[in-house]
Image (tube, rainbow, N blue to C red):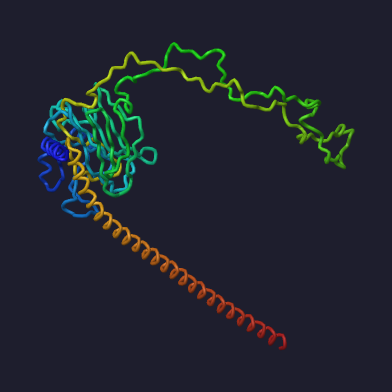
Amino acid sequence: MKSIIVVAALVAACTAHLYFKETFDDDTWTSRWTKSIVKDADGTSGNWKLSAGKWYNDKKEDQGLKTDDDARFYIISAPIEEFSNKGKDLVLQYTIKHEQQIDCGGGYLKLLPASSFDDPKNFSPDSTYNIMFGPDICGTSTRKTHVIFNHQGTNHLIKKEVKCETDQMTHLYTLIVHPDNTYEVLIDDAKVQQGSLEDDWDMVPPKEIPDPEARKPEDWVDDAQMDDPEDKKPEGYDDIPSLIKDPEAAKPEDWDDDADGEWEAPMIDNPAYKGPWKAKRIPNPAYKGPWVQPRIPNPKYAPEPELYAYDSIAHVGIEIWQVKSGTIFDNIIVTDSIAEAKEWAEKWAVMKKGEKSMFDAEEEKRRKQEEEDRKKMEEERKKEEEEKKDDDDDDDDDDEEDEDDDDDDDDDEVEDHHDKHEL
């Protein structure tokens, strides 16, 4: 039995194929990737450059393709060895780092058929694609991972919520589409979503629909509770007024009945009044629960065993808008081997540790510098306050000297006047 398993594994390894890989190791990437010119005319086309960013494990190995201009479109593509994913797994995997603390912008990839454009320079937001996959962030309202499939010319968004990472570190995004019409989404090699292509997208009509002929029975009881038939309204309940005269009110002393009319105490809420009488509620023995419209087989439903499959996958592309640039794409692979994607994930795990160490060191350095700057500013503020206080004290001393001089002058005047008087 073990030998059979080993043989099966060897056969799978031999048939596995890596259709595309890109690690952006050097400047030769420009010979493989073509930047679109569709946004050149209006000046909104962004530039790319190679960079490992501010923190990394290995500066050379970790460099990727980085967006370099704020408030720009980034549209670029590379050819893939054209293939169809019929009868096999399809894996799209890549790493992305939003080092700039992205506020609004995309970070997704597209797999496109050969018919998407006649020239890669004409790749545009309107170009037909097969799959769009990756994170999209804008403020706090949009923070998700897109998983979009094109089916019969229409783009279908996943109906489930798929989270995305929003920090400044490198993250690994993986989409696996299986030939049994199921899928998996992994982030950082951990599964975050999975399911059926039929159930989680509206690419095919549902298997069942509510029966349009069904009607709720007339005697169906929707109320879970009812009035207690044995509960009776107390005698005199309706005679209790809602308002009464304020018993603590007193006629003002200056009230003139002739001029002001007969005085009446103001009205206040009656504490004895409890509102309109209602019978107490008890469980309804006839309650059947909410009525649910029965479902029937959908006559428009037809299974599509090859819903997952595309006849042509010929390009990988990036087509995004970013308000704040600085995102780094790297380690892009397209393969039919889950095992190979796993090997790349293991490399990312090693890189992540080194990157995190450098990030933490840089953050600690930044924190210390900010603390030093804060202390320096505080010291300068105190010094300025002391100097100002000294200046104010000097001004007070000068004022006192001036007052003493004035007093001496006054004394001299008095003495002169006294002498004259004696004479």
Q: Is residue 19 visible?
A: no
Q: Extreme top residue here?
A: 213
Image point (19%, 55%), residue name:
58
Image point (17%, 48%), residue name:
50
Image point (39%, 63%), residue name:
374
In this view, the residue in front, 199 or 364, is: 199
In this view, the residue in front, 79 or 20, is: 20
- Image quarter of residue 81: top left
Image point (79%, 34%), residue name:
267
Provide residue 194's location: percent of width, then percent of height. Answer: 31, 34
The quadrant in which the N terminus is found is: top left
- Horizontal side of 213 relative to 109 (left or right) equals right
Q: Is residue 11 visible?
A: yes
Provide residue 108's location: percent of width, then percent of height. Answer: 26, 37
- Horizontal side of 20 relative to 308 (left or right) equals left
- Image quarter of residue 297: top left
Q: Please, is residue 116 above or below residue 144 in the view?
A: above
